[in-house]
Image (tube, helix red, strand yellow):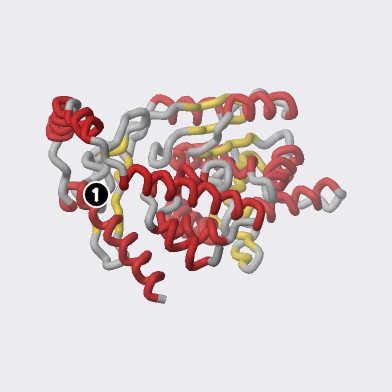
Amino acid sequence: MTNDELIGLLESLPLRHLHKLAQGRVHRHFRLGKHRLIDVFLSLPSETREALETDVLQYQTQRSVRASGPAPSRVSAKKKPLPQKSKTKHTASSLPPPITVSHLLEGLGVPPPAKEFHPDPWQEEAVTQLATTDVIVSVPTGSGKTFVAIEATKYAFKQERTVIYTSPLKALSNTKYMEFSQLFGPEKVGILTGDRRDNAQAPLLIMTTEILRNLLYDAASGEIDLRLNTLGLVILDESQYLADPERGVVWEETIIFCPTQARLLLLSASIGNPQDLAAWLTSIRPVPCHLIHHQNRSVPLRGGYLHPSGMLSPFFRTRDIAKGQGYTLHPETKRLSKQYEEETVGHRNRR
């Protein structure tokens, strides 16, 4: 079967049946649209494609048989479940009305200045525990992990200890360098990355995790760096990189070689097993590790769909996305998504 013949047969099938055909053949097929799924089908190995072509032809034969032989008794039998169909319509009409784009964007922007800031109990707990233990903070994005890092840094300064703040990306390190320079003063903040070295003797150094790992390597080989002698706090931001297949070893070695007198503060919003990580740190470090973990979102999630034409639509009928609840797609998103799929499939046919 040629590619054009297979494309024609696949495009005549509904998307739900294409996903059935993709089961066991295409990884994570449920994330693909119709045109993308067909492209993947065309690139399958020869043996897998032959089996796919057989299933497609079989389904087409079944459709032809059903279409050519309508029996009167069957038609009447299909008319009986009409009350159930109307019940489905009633369920759809009972849904809340879909939100508008202005409702989706409501409240976004710079919030008004707060009269007085009051830290959450878990933030105070994390700062207090850092005086005697290592701490893992595993909380949702926007909960206030940076506040813990700032307060812990202030405490280390009072103890006349230096602080190292690491991130996995140079761009994030540069952002934190500017943020902390405004907060603590440029004379107290330095940065070390692969292509930047400013104020390297500052009491607070911002760097990538690889740079810190290399510094610890030098210290382990006898090339002692004076900054490590006074090191009191190491902050590992985005510590979920421990699970990264390629870069996770950098975080592991950094933790293992970290000086014993320094406290470790691990920050993340997406550690899948923080309890296991805390137990591991407790087993290899001279002090126990205290875990701060919750899933209460301070900043709600919202979803939108941006069509290539520039049209924006709410993704769901409701504005906020709450974990553990079902969702119904916004009717405008359904329309735009279907329009985009028809346009792209039609464009491929014209080629």
Drawn side of residue 228 relative to residue 329, left or right:
right
In this picture, is 236 found above or below 210? above
In this picture, is 145 found above or below 51? above
Determine whether the residue tagged by mark 1 lies in a helix, strand or loop: strand
Q: Depth check: give the residue in front, 150 or 154.
A: 150
Kind of residue at badge 1: Pro
Inspect this view and state whether residue 187 appears: no
Drawn side of residue 118 relative to residue 77, left or right:
right
The residue where tag 1 is placed is 314
Where is residue 289 drawn, in percent x and y? Answer: 62, 26
Where is residue 230 drawn, in percent x and y? Answer: 69, 43
Residue lying furthest right: 222
Q: Depth check: give the residue in front, 29 or 232.
A: 29
Residue at (25, 32) in percent of width and height: 74
Where is residue 341 drawn, in percent x and y? Answer: 34, 60
Residue at (27, 67) in percent of width and height: 309
Quadrant (top left, top right, bottom left, bottom right) of the N terminus: bottom right
Where is residue 160 drawn, in percent x and y? Answer: 60, 41
Residue at (62, 42) in percent of width and height: 234
Inspect this view and state whether residue 141 appears: yes
Quadrant (top left, top right, bottom left, bottom right) of the C terminus: bottom left
